[in-house]
Image (tube, helix red, strand yellow):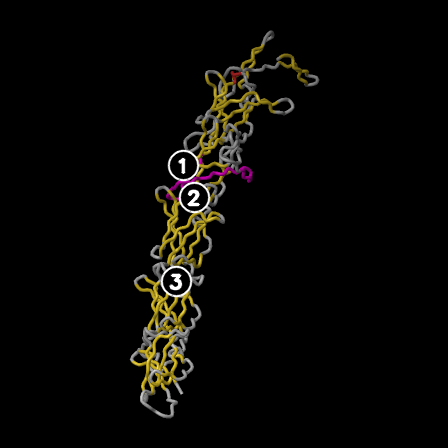
Amino acid sequence: DVTVRNVVINDTLTAVIDWVTSVDEVFEGLGIFITLSTKDNSELYSVNISHPQNTTTFTFTNDLPWDTVITLHTSAGDALGQGTEPLELFSTVELTAPTNITLTHTVENDTLTAVVEWEHAVVVEGFTADQAVSIDGMGTLVKLWDEENNLLRSEKVPLSENYAVLMLDDDLPWNTHFTLQTFAKESEGDKTDAEDLFSGIHLTAPVDISVEYLVIDDTLTAEIRWVHSVQDVFAGLGTSIDLWEGDTIINTTHLPHTENTFSCALGTPVTWQTMFTLQTTAMHTKGGQTDFSQIFGDFLLSPPRDISVKHSYRDGDLTAIVTWENAIEEQFVGLQTVLNLVIEDERTKRSENSEGQRTLFISYEETEASFKSSELPWNTKFTLQSAVGDNRGPESEPLDLFSGVDLDPPGDISVTPEVVDEALTAVISWNNPNVFEDMTGPPVKIKLWDETEDGEMKMIEEIIIPHGQNQARISLDEGYPWQTRLSMQSDFGSIQGIQSTYFDLFNHIELSPPTNITIIANESSSSVEWLHSLELGQFHGLGTILNIWVFDPSSFNLTLLNQ
């Protein structure tokens, strides 16, 4: 009838042993001999209890392991009776794992702290989990494990406490797991299921990403900003910035949570096509990553504005002078202006040095370009773009290089006859429609024509009148036929203006017949006198034709006798 029961007395686990003596007759020297051993039969020590005492206690101390067993013998002096079966001294107390485990996280002074709380499941007389009662040598064992289930460290918590405070540091990986066990000295009960210590906090990707562009030391720089989406930031939280060229990471930068700005300059190895991603990290663990974004994708390569085309006539050629204003205010290395020449709505793009190039790359500092009509078709159009390397912004609207020039013939053409030094002179006057802003303009071409018997116009001579002169004189004494006609047009060199209609040079002058004709006649002679009626007066080459006719009175016919 030996019994062993466990009770907590003064924070000490105590084993109370009770028995009933089986000897019928009591005598001097009768007692109970108790042997304490380990489970492998290693004797620890023994005690002898004299009759009539029938109870004793043992406390859970450093001298007694958890698996201590006892054997009782009836003793009489040095003689021992048969022993009882070994009885466990303490291990009848089940080291039941804690229950109702909760995990909370707090951040204080930039330190992430995990607070693990639980309820004790150990049942011992004299111990109540909801009271601040402890049991010497017993408690809760908190074990911390890495991802490969390697033990990182353990921490013992007395039964008077039901929580553990664990701080994130360099010795604890983000993916640390924890388990709880009830222990008694070196003996451990069953473990709870492993739970995440920190990684239950979702490392969501950064949000509210924006990119601002600055020019620093003549270099375009992107300043990337973001906001952490993790609710409470802490030491060990950070952002990993990956720069991508295609599918290859060309640079990775790790920043602590105290920084949420990253600057990236355009230049080797960063190109206009370089992409970036942002990824939340904790210690060496990677969390959520943003989508790919172009670093310079939001930088608008605006086309030049206030584009104008002016013209000038230089060295026998029409020149188109294109000017513009840059829309991008701050210039940086690599920024260029692209001028595309468009011919008959077909764009030909060739390299900068190829023959017959149709695309020009112009330094962004320059805001002017000149083109000669002798080198390009008259219907050439152009567009302007801003570019960085092979990356071009939107084009401006196509504009004409030359075809805005007025090709109409000179206006207000007039031919006025004058007699100068007895020479009949045709004074030709006109207005030139093409006086450019720089006061230059194309010369005027006067063509002299003679009409053949077949009605065809045959050019006699071509006369070039320089710009700025709007009058020319042609004398009959220069040998031109009376029926000479003229036409006029502007001469742009590579292209001719529209030719005017034909004008008479002299033939429009009315050769009116003489007037005040008087005849004085006698039997032998006749004198005829007259006056010239031309208002111009007399000039070289002017004469009078005298026709002498014979009159037939019978038929009333006139027959030319002499001229």
User: Residue 366: which disc?
Assistant: 1
Please give the residue where the numbered disc 2 appears in the rendered image.
269
Question: What secondary structure is found at the residue carrying circle 1?
Answer: loop
Residue 282 seen in this snapshot:
yes
Quarter placement of the N terminus: bottom left
Looking at the picture, tell me which residue is in the foreground, 452 or 398: 398
Report the number of discs.
Answer: 3
* Residue, far right: 554
User: Residue 69: which disc?
Assistant: none
Q: Earlier in the sequence, mark 3 or mark 2?
A: 3
Calculate the distance from the C-alpha at mark 1 to the C-alpha at mark 3.
67 Å
Classify mark 2: residues with Cα within 10 Å, few (<14), some (14-19) or many (20+).
Answer: few
Q: Position of residue 69 (x, y in %)?
A: 39, 78
Q: Is residue 471 above or below residue 128?
A: above
Please give the residue where the numbered disc 3 appears in the rendered image.
152
Q: In the figure, residue 141 lies in which quadrant?
A: bottom left
Q: Position of residue 247 (x, y in %)?
A: 49, 49
